[in-house]
Image: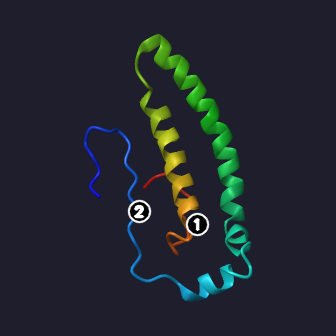
Amino acid sequence: MQPTADYPVNLQIEYPEHSSRLLAIFSIPYFLIRYLLLLPTMICLMFVGIAAFLVVWIAFWAVAFTGRYPRGMFDFAAGYIRWTSRVSAYLFGLTDKYPPFRMSS
């Protein structure tokens, strides 16, 4: 399905032709294995999420007074959502690639 150009947000996840059988086998009886692997990332995301909440709240006020979303605040919020999406994709088994510790693509 092709993304439409009239909507400002698009999420694309490529279908993996091959997935790790070993990770799948261990994830069935030990469903917490992916959570344990993601523990360092989840801790970082918790603090970044708090910062993102504050940045977005301040950005709402900036938009209300200036009519523009500050570019740095937009990039920070978009980076947080991008990082969270990569972590969720790994957690739900959509990809076997461990999510990197960065907010950029």
Q: Nearer the viewer, residue 13 or 78?
A: 13
Q: What is the x, y in percent for residue 78?
A: 47, 42
- Position above or below: 60 against 65: below
Q: Amino acid at mark 1?
A: Phe
Q: Is residue 65 left or right of residue 87?
A: left
Q: What is the x, y in percent for residue 24?
A: 60, 82
Q: Which residue is mark 1?
A: 92
Q: What is the x, y in percent for residue 37?
A: 68, 71
Q: Is residue 40 left or right of residue 89?
A: right
Residue 101 position by quadrant: bottom right
- Position above or below: 16 against 4: below
Mark 1 Cα-neighbour bin, 10 Å: few <14, some 14–19, many ≥20: few
Marks 2 and 1, Cα distance to the nearest angstrom?
12 Å
Answer with mark 2 or mark 1, whichever residue precedes in sequence: 2
Q: Which residue is mark 2?
A: 13
Residue at position x 47%, y 19% in the image:
63
Q: Nearer the viewer, residue 14 or 36?
A: 14
